Amino acid sequence: MNLLFLCKRFPQGRDLLTRPYGRFFHLARELAGRGHQVRLALLSYRGLRSEETSFSGISWSSDDLWPRGPLPYLRRLEAIAKGSTPDWVVGVSDTYFGILARRLARRFGARYAVDAYDDFEAYIPWAKPLHLAWRNALAGAELVTAAGPQLADLLEKRSERQVRVLPMAADPDFQVLDRGACRTKLDLPQDRRLIGHVGAFDHQRGCKVVLDAFDEVRSTHPEVSLVLSGRQSLALHRPPYIYGLGYIADELMPALVNSLDVACVALANNAFGRSSYPVKLCEAVACRIPAVASATAPTRWMLQQDERFLAAIGDPSAMAQRMLENLGRGRFDYGTPASWIEVGASFESMLSA
């Protein structure tokens, strides 16, 4: 198959061209590795120059909206589609790219697929015309995939069409590593038990419950420390109780996860949280670190309804209880987690069918 993927260049703030990761990259990479012709067309909004390159079996192009606006980018996509004559146009990473996939496929006689990993409408709930165009793109696609069954159900109701599940997975670097060596890399103490919030610490996404829960844990277990990452964490750095590490480079994230005795994933009870399938939870599972996650429907599904790793949303006492229960658990074998190899094979099968 000849496949053209459309994606933003900085999903979740990370540059795919220089730091490829996640489903935005691995779906395309796995299909390229299976012998398909794959092109990944990126769009940025930061005034960057246009680029062309090739690696991981993928032909890459990157263009920017600024300062010339969307028309040159649309012409560029049309030139790419005309020159490559794709069998499939695949829109990933945002509503705009599902809408663009529909436009290109209709113009050049291709089929198109749309992949969603979050409820994109929750990002800007007031943008009703954009939501209508997105739902039309879903309704007209030959294939729509979602990161989990709850999101698939939501998209089915909005588009009145079948949506297939294509789950999240951890990137290959996330595997079991020596805990002591990982703590040395990050200058974390060897003699304390560490609870960590995985992912950037953000008060607006329900993370405060982790701080409140940790206060309860520390009141009876002063030998336990909390580890936070992300720029907001620097303001909370108070060793030996809280280690706010600030920005962590991509290559050190597996070491951070493996440094922990317990990994926490906190989500708020809002439209975003109720449709979020946090890849950080996949990373903890891949590293066999006991998790404590806010018990949304998606995290329940990801953790196979195992109450040992679930805490009531927004309830610090419930989260503190789960933290304490899991501190002595050691590495936990969740079974064989999904890998991008398997997810890519599933996507290939869906496209072929």
Image: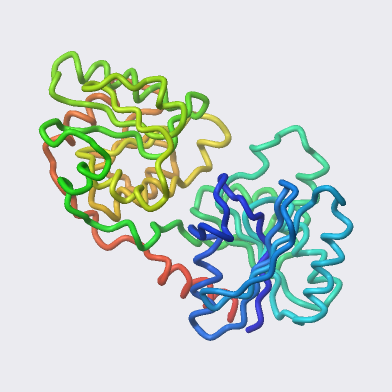
Residue 32, image x, y percentages: 54, 78
**Residue at image x 29%, y 55%?**
286
**Residue at image x 56%, y 46%?**
12
Left or right: 319 as drawn, with respect to 328: right
Q: Considering depth in this image, is 134 or 212 the residue closer to the camera?
A: 212
Specify how the rendered protein is coloured: rainbow
- Total numbered labels: 0
Left or right: 72 as drawn, with respect to 271: right
Residue 108, image x, y percentages: 83, 76
Q: Please say if 300 is above or below 235.
A: below
Residue 343, image x, y percentages: 45, 67
Displayed quadrant of residue 314? top left
**Quadrant where the N terminus lies?**
bottom right
**Quadrant where the C terminus lies?**
bottom right
**Residue at image x 23%, y 39%?**
308
Displayed quadrant of residue 294? top left
Q: Considering depth in this image, is 334 or 178 the residue closer to the camera?
A: 178
Left or right: 168 as drawn, with respect to 336: right
Q: Considering depth in this image, is 34 or 71 the residue closer to the camera?
A: 71
Q: Considering depth in this image, is 168 or 72 the residue closer to the camera?
A: 72
Q: Please say if 208 is above or below 179.
A: above
Residue 114, image x, y percentages: 66, 62
